[in-house]
Image: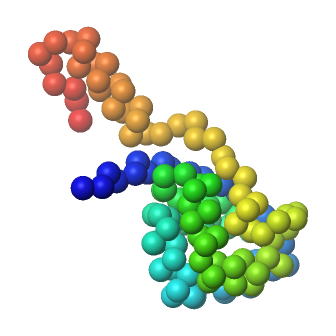
Amino acid sequence: MSETPTRRRICFQQRIHPDRIEEYKRRHAAVWPEMLEALEATGWHNYSLFLAPDGLLIGYVETDSLTAAADRMAAHEVNTRWQAEMADLFDGIESPPDESFVPLEEIFNLEQQLAAARSAAGASRPGQVPRR
């Protein structure tokens, strides 16, 4: 029985050329099915992209490691083709888009803090059930 890797919540940013935003949206409205399958197979879970009007792109993914997930994707030929298709849409990068993620530090997580607060409340008041 194999052990399931722990998923980490990862957020990253990039920037899309402001004059290429509509093209970026168009391409992501119909991502190639083989690209979607490769992402899932290589451990990209709950993956979302968010785009601001000025081209700021925020990505969110749950995976064991952003580096490891990107490395697994690099082994897929479809990823090489996708990155080449997308490269000219990005602003300020010298390497392929999937090698240019700028990870963001998670500084607040509601579920983690609630669990810690409830645990502390339960430990400080023996016999009392923490509120939900």
At 87% from the left and 65% from the top, the residue drawn is: 94
Outermost front residue: 1
Q: 23 or 80, which is in the foreground?
A: 80
Residue 87 position, x and y percent, is 79, 76
In percent of width and height, residue 80 lies at 69, 79
Residue 12 falls in which quadrant of the image? bottom right
Residue in the image at 59% along x and 77% along y = 76
Q: Is residue 62 left or right of residue 103?
A: left
Task: Identify the image's colour scheme: rainbow, by chain, secondary structure or one colour.
Answer: rainbow
Q: Residue 115, image x and y in percent?
A: 33, 32
Quarter the C terminus occupies:
top left
Instruction: In the rendered view, tell whether residue 6 sits above or below residue 24.
Output: above
| Viewport quadrant of the N terminus | bottom left
In which quadrant of the rendered view does residue 124 lie? Answer: top left
Q: Is residue 96 left or right of residue 25?
A: right
Give the vertical position of 9 relative to 48 (above or below): above
Foreground of the two, 22 or 123: 123
Q: Residue 79: x, y in percent?
A: 64, 78
Answer whether residue 24 is visible to the viewer in this image: no
Q: Horizontal placement of 61 versus 93: left or right?
A: left
Residue pictured at 52% horizontal, 72% vertical: 39
Q: Is residue 129 visible?
A: yes
In this view, the residue in front, 73 or 127, is 73
Total count of labels:
0
In the rendered view, tell whether residue 59 sits above or below residue 34: above
